[in-house]
Amino acid sequence: MTDVSSGVATHVAAPGLLIEHPLRLWSEPLDDAVALDAFRAVYTDPVLVNGQLTELGELVARARMLKAAIAPIHHRIRSTVVTPSRVAIAFTISGCHVGTLASPLGELPATHRDVAVTGLDIFELEQGSGRVAAVWAVADWPSLLGPVDTAG
């Protein structure tokens, strides 16, 4: 396991991609002047996200929202699988839920609780450049809602 909350991660090489690069984009602060270029160094523009073509400006906005909603944000890599054309990362994001989080469940207002979300990203790499051309991402967003009362 690798904790990249400090920005230090084990280098797991794939063609043109180090696993730490996409995680840093989603965890470290990015200056407005360099954010889009930093994403372009890792992702194609546009990039396919769960079957939807997505402009990198949208990914930058999502990363900013996530960093504002969970702070400080920590990523812990649970497992990786690397092939010449794909990289899969199982991870946990954790931190204090301090701001509104936009999720597939809708907008979740800050709870000021420590939270953890487990996810899996599969990156499909562009031949030649090694940049991420497609992402298939799933996350356990319902875990943010807390325990469900199944009694009675």
Image: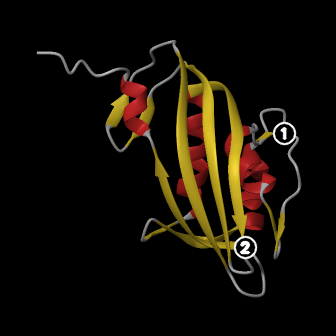
Q: Residue at x 42, y 30 (%)?
A: 143
Q: State whether residue 86 is above or below residue 25.
A: below
Q: State whether residue 86 is above or below residue 56.
A: below
SS category of the residue bearing label 1: loop
Q: Residue 40 or 1: which is nearer the viewer?
A: 1
Query: In this figure, which residue is indicated by the disc labeled 2?
Result: 131
What x and y, as percent, mark residue 48? 51, 71
Q: Residue at x 76, y 60 (%)?
A: 37
Between discs 2 and 1, the one toward the N terminus: 1
Q: State whether residue 142 is above or below residue 131.
A: above
Q: Quadrant of residue 146?
A: top left
Q: Residue 48 or 46: which is nearer the viewer?
A: 48
**CA–CA distance between discs 2 and 1?**
20 Å
Judging from the image, the colouring scheme is secondary structure
What x and y, as percent, mark residue 101? 45, 32
- Quarter of the figure with the C terminus: top left
What x and y, as percent, mark residue 9? 86, 45
Q: Quadrant of residue 47?
A: bottom right
Q: Are marks 2 and 1 in contact (CB under 8 Å)?
A: no
